[in-house]
Amino acid sequence: MMSDNPSQASDQQKPKVQTSEQILVRRGKLELMRGTGEAYRNTWRTDHSTADIHGRFSDIETDVLVELGHEVSVAGRMMTHRVMGKSSFIKIQDGSGQIQLFISRDAVGGAEVYNPTKKWDLGDILGAKGTLFRTNAGELSVKVSHIEMVSKCLRPLPEKWHGLSDIETRYRQRYVDLMVTPESRDTFRTRSKVVSLLRQGLEAKEFIEVETPMLQSQPGGAAARPFTTHHNALDMELFLRIAPELYLKRLLVGGFERVFEINRNFRNEGLDATHNPEFTMVEFYQAYADFNDAMDTTEGLIRGIADGLGIAAVEWEGVQIDLSQPFKRIRLDESVFEKRPDLRGHAHDKALLATVCLQEIPDFKPLITWKAGHYLVALFEELVEGGLDQPTFITHYPVDVSPLARRNNEEPSVTDRFELFVAGCEMANGFSELNDPDDQRGRFVAQAQAKAAGDLEAAGVDEDYLRALEFGMPPAAGVGIGVDRLVMMLTGQHSIRDVLLFPHMRPE
C-alpha cells in the first residue's frame, strides 16, 4: 500500500496510475471513517484564527505563555506532518496563515486516539483544541488536548517545495492554487482591499452606489461585441451588458447627481494578458463636472488606493511606476505629432492618415466606415500607446471614435474625453457627457450605419435613452476604471488571469 507523506515527489512528476493509487488509498481511509460514524461532521467550531494567535501571543515570553495556559480552538488544512513515535508535529493552515500543533499520545487520550492520527494525509482538514506554548526552537504552537478529522482530503496536494507550478492548472484549479501558493492568496486579499478602498474613496466624495441591469434589451455604453441570450417567457433576445453607462446616466436625469457602480461587464472578445470576456469595472458619474474634474477624481482615487495599500511606487511590466507624482496630460493628436511631425496640421486629412497607417501598421485592415479620427487613433495605438510608461492622461479624442462624449467648445471635431495609460496599458476612460439629445441621436445613427456595414462592435439607436435625454440631463462627467488592470498594476501581475479567481478557460 502506497504511503502519502511530505517526502513524496510532486504529483506532476508521477505517472497518473500512481496518483490514482493515492486516491484509492485515501478513499480506503474514508471508508473506515464512515464505518465508525459520520465522516463529514459539521460540529467543529473555532475561537481563534492563526493570524489572531500570532498577532496576540508572538511577543509573549515563553514562561509567561506557559503561566497563561491560554486555550484555543483552531482548524485548518494539514500542510506538514512529522511523526516522532509517541508524538507528532502538524502544521495546519487556515484562511489567515499557519500554526503548528504538537500532539502527544498521552495528552490526547492514549494510543486509541493517537495512532489513527499518524495515518492522516496532507490536505486533511483538522480541528484541534489545546493550550499555547513555545517549542524548544522558539516556535509558537498549540499543545493539543483534543484533535479530530473535520474533512477528509481525497486528492494529493502538490509537492510542498514546488507548489502548483503548472500555470494552466493554477487557473483551472484555483482552489488548489490558493491552498499551496501564498502569493496567490496575497494577491486576492489585495484585490479585496482595492475594491474596498475604491468604494470608500467614492463614498467619501458623496457618490452613492447603485445597481443597473446586467441583462439588457439593447447593448450600449461601449464599442464592443455583446453576448446574446434568449428570454423564454418574453420570447425576446437579450444581451449581457458591455457597460452600465447609459443606465447610470439615466439616473443623472432622475436627479441622482453622483452615482457609481462596481460592476461585472461582458464582452464577446478574445483573451489575452489584459482581456477576459467577463471583467470588473467601476463607473462613476458626477453632475456639474467636466472631464478635467473627472481626471482629478480618477487620479485622486488611484493615489488614495495606493496610499491605503502603503504603495508609493510599483514595478509593473518592467517599469518603475511612481504613483506619487502628478499624472501627465497630453492631447492625442499632439502625442502622434511628436512621433510624426510631418502630420501636424493634417489631423483631418483622411487620405494622408490612411496612407501613413498602411506604412506604419503591420497587417493594417481598416473598416470601410472609418473617418479621419479612426486613422489618427490607429496611429496613436501603434506609435504612442506602448511607450506611455508613467501614468498619462491622453485627452481630446476625435468625435469619430467617441459617440457618447461631449464635443469640445473650441474644436467640435474632438471631444472632452480622456484615457489613462500606465505602462502602455489603458486603465480608465472618461469624458464630459454628451447631453444634447439631437447630437446624441446623430451619433447613434452613425453607429447604426457602421453596424449595418459590418462593425460588430458598433451600437444601435437607443430610443429610451434618447427620451431620457429629452427630459434634460445636467452637464456631467463620467469615468470607467478597469478594476482588474488596476489590481494587476498594484500587485505587479503580468496577466489578468492572475487577478481573477476563476478566469475563463477552454474546456478540458
Image: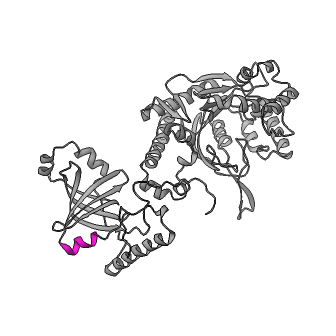
Q: How many marks?
A: 0
Taking the image as shown, residue 445 lies to the left or right of residue 96, namely right
Taking the image as shown, residue 457 lies to the left or right of residue 478, namely right
Q: Is residue 290 something that shows in the picture?
A: no
Image quarter of the N terminus: bottom left
Q: Quadrant of residue 108?
A: bottom left
In terms of depth relative to the viewer, which is nearer, 395 or 93? 93
The chief SS type of the magenta part is: helix
Taking the image as shown, residue 481 lies to the left or right of residue 450, namely left
Q: Quadrant of residue 504?
A: bottom right
Image quarter of the C terminus: bottom right
Image location of residue 145, percent across then percent down: 19, 63
Q: Is residue 11 above or below residue 450?
A: below
What residue lies at 82% left-to-right and 40% top-to-bottom?
A: 365
Image location of residue 492, percent across then percent down: 51, 39
Image location of residue 221, percent across then percent down: 70, 41
Image location of residue 179, percent across then percent down: 42, 56
What residue lies at 55% left-to-right and 28% top-to-bottom?
A: 299
Q: How is the image coloured?
A: one colour
**Residue 441 inside the magenta-drawn segment:** no
In the image, which residues are magenta?
110-118
Q: Is residue 505 above or below residue 311?
A: below
Q: Is residue 215 something that shows in the picture?
A: yes
